[in-house]
Image (cartoon, helix red, strand yellow):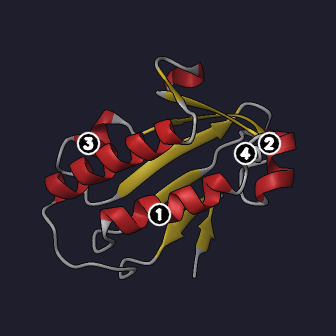
Amino acid sequence: MTWVLGRDIVWPDNVKGGPMKADRRQKVFQREMAARLLAAGAVEGEQAFGYRYRLETRAGTLVLTMHASDLDGKSRILSLFGRFLNPVRAVGYTGESNPYSGKWNFHFGEDCDPLEAVEQVMFKIEGVLPERGA
């Protein structure tokens, strides 16, 4: 089950897993999320709006980042911030991204297993990736 709040996708805190220290959860989430984005074809480096990754999708260019403030070991929320450069086109593919700003953010509560969070984000992202071999 998902809730949509201001176009941010928020999963319940009890998706899977148990207590894990905040700094460990952040590190696992960051490492695994980066690896999966790169495996999906993302390019790492300075991108539009200061985001860290760029991924070409059927919905247009998607830039993504995990802000440093979320990786300082203090935040209990796991977040991936995304933004499509063509918001109008993107909303036709996602049905969830903000049609004005193009933002497509993912947030997970403190009890969510970081690997499960990565899987859920990648499920959504894979839905807008170009078909393999196309």
Q: Which residue is mark 1?
A: 119
Query: Do the residues bearing badges 1 and 3 touch, measured as CB atoms within 8 Å?
Result: no
95 with respect to 47 (left or right): right
Query: Do the residues bearing badges 4 and 2 touch, measured as CB atoms within 8 Å?
Result: no
| Residue 39 percent coordinates (x, y) | 49, 40
Labels 4 and 3: the sequence-earlier one: 3
Labels 1 and 2: the sequence-earlier one: 2
Which label sits on residue 71? 3
- Mark 4 packing: few (<14 Cα in 10 Å), some, or many (20+)? few
| Residue 12 percent coordinates (x, y) | 44, 78
Which label sits on residue 132? 4
Which label sits on residue 58? 2
Looking at the image, is mark 4 or mark 3 nearer the viewer?
Answer: 4
Looking at the image, is mark 1 or mark 4 nearer the viewer?
Answer: 4
Residue at 48% from the left image edge and 36% from the top image edge? 38
Residue at 46% from the left image edge and 27% from the top image edge? 52
User: CA–CA distance between discs 1 and 4?
Assistant: 19 Å
Kind of element beneath mark 1:
helix
